[in-house]
Image (cartoon, rainbow, N blue to C red):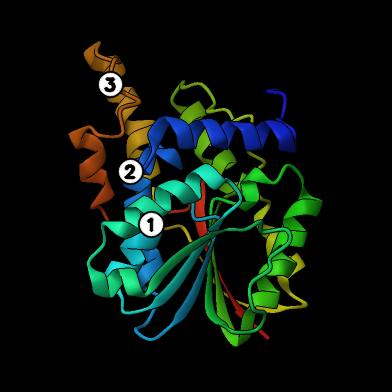
Amino acid sequence: MTERYDLRRIYEYWVEQANTHGQSYAASWSDIGVIRLEIQELLKHLQDGDRVLDVGCANGYSTAALATARRIEIRGLDYIPEMIKAAECRRAELPEPVRARTSFAVGNIMDLKEPAGQWDKVVVVRVLINLGNWENQKRALEQCARMLRTGGLLLLSEATLQGWKRLNSLRKEWGLEEIPMPAFNTYLDQEKVVEAAAPLFDSVSVSDFASTYFVGTRVLKPLLAKLAGNEDRVADPLSEWNRWFSMAPAWGDYGTQKLFVLRRR
C-alpha cells in the first residue's frame, strides 16, 4: 500500500502544483471532464443572490465558473498563497460585474476566520481528502458548519472509499489493475461523513454525478485500448472519448467523486 503523505508533504505538493500550473484547471486536478461535471452539479444548488464561501478554491477555476453562471457573491479561500495569487490574476481577467462579486483570500479550512453564520452556501471541493486523517476531516466539517446560516447548504464534493472500491471491483472483473489512491489523499468513508455530520446537518442527498464518466474512462476506455493495441492515450483527459462521456447522464454508483448536500440545522 502506498505510504500516505503527512500534512507538510501535502502542503508542499500543492505549492508545487500551483507553481507548475498557474491559472490552469490542472492545478487542482488534471481531469477536466470531472471538474466540468462537478461545476454543473454544484450549480444545481446555487441561486442568484446567494452568499457563497468556496473553501479550498485552489486557483479559482471553479470559483470563477460558478460566479459567471450565477449572480452570486462568492469568496474563495485556499491555504496555499501561490494558489490565491493565481486566483487573483484570474479575477482580474473577469468581466467587471463578475469581478465585483468575487473575492479571494488565504484561509485554512481547519481554522476559518470568515464571518460565522452568514453564508447561504459553503462549497468544499476535494479539500477534506487532503487533510491526512479522519480527525482533521471532522474538524473541517465543524468549521464549515460554523460558517453557515441555519438552513444553509454545505456542498461537499469529495472522493469516497465506497466509490473507489466499487470502481476497482468492476475493473478487477475485467482483468484491470486496481487504481491506487494518491499518496497525498485520504478518501472519505461515505457512511462516516453522514454520521459525523448528523448533529449539525440534515443529509439532503449524495450524488454519484460522475459514475458514468468513471466507468467510461476508467473501465471501458482501457479495455478498448488494450484490444486495439493502443494504450498510449488511456490516461489522457483531453481525449474525445473523455469529452463524450462527460456529456453522458450519470448512472450507477461507480464514481469515486460524490457530492454530499448537507443542510445546516
Instruction: Answer whether labels 3 and 2 touch (C-beta < 8 Å).
Output: no
User: What's the residue at 22%, 66% (across, down)?
Assistant: 95
Q: Which mark is residue 62?
A: 1
Q: Measured from the top left, where is residue 135 in percent x and y?
A: 81, 53
Q: Residues within 10 Å of mark 2 (few under 14, many from 20)?
A: some
Q: Residues within 10 Å of mark 3 (few under 14, many from 20)?
A: few
187 up-or-down from 194: above or below: above
User: What's the residue at 31%, 58% (across, down)?
Assistant: 92
Instruction: Answer whether labels 2 and 1 touch (C-beta < 8 Å).
Output: no
Q: Measured from the top left, where is residue 220 in percent x and y?
A: 32, 32
Residue identified by numbered label 3? 233
Report whether residue 40 is seen.
no
Screen quadrant of the C terminus: bottom right
Q: Measured from the top left, where is residue 127 in percent x and y?
A: 59, 51
If you read the primary sequence from the N terminus, does the residue marked by circle 3 or circle 2 appear first? 2
Q: Which mark is residue 32?
A: 2
Q: Nearer the viewer, residue 46 or 160?
A: 46
If you read the primary sequence from the N terminus, does the residue marked by circle 2 or circle 1 appear first? 2
Is residue 39 rendered to the left or right of residue 54? left
Q: Residues within 10 Å of mark 1 (few under 14, many from 20)?
A: many
Q: Nearer the viewer, residue 114 or 145?
A: 114
Residue at disc 3, secondary structure: loop
Residue at disc 2, secondary structure: helix
Q: Amino acid at mark 1?
A: Ser
Q: Amino acid at mark 2?
A: Ile
Q: Residue furthest right?
A: 135
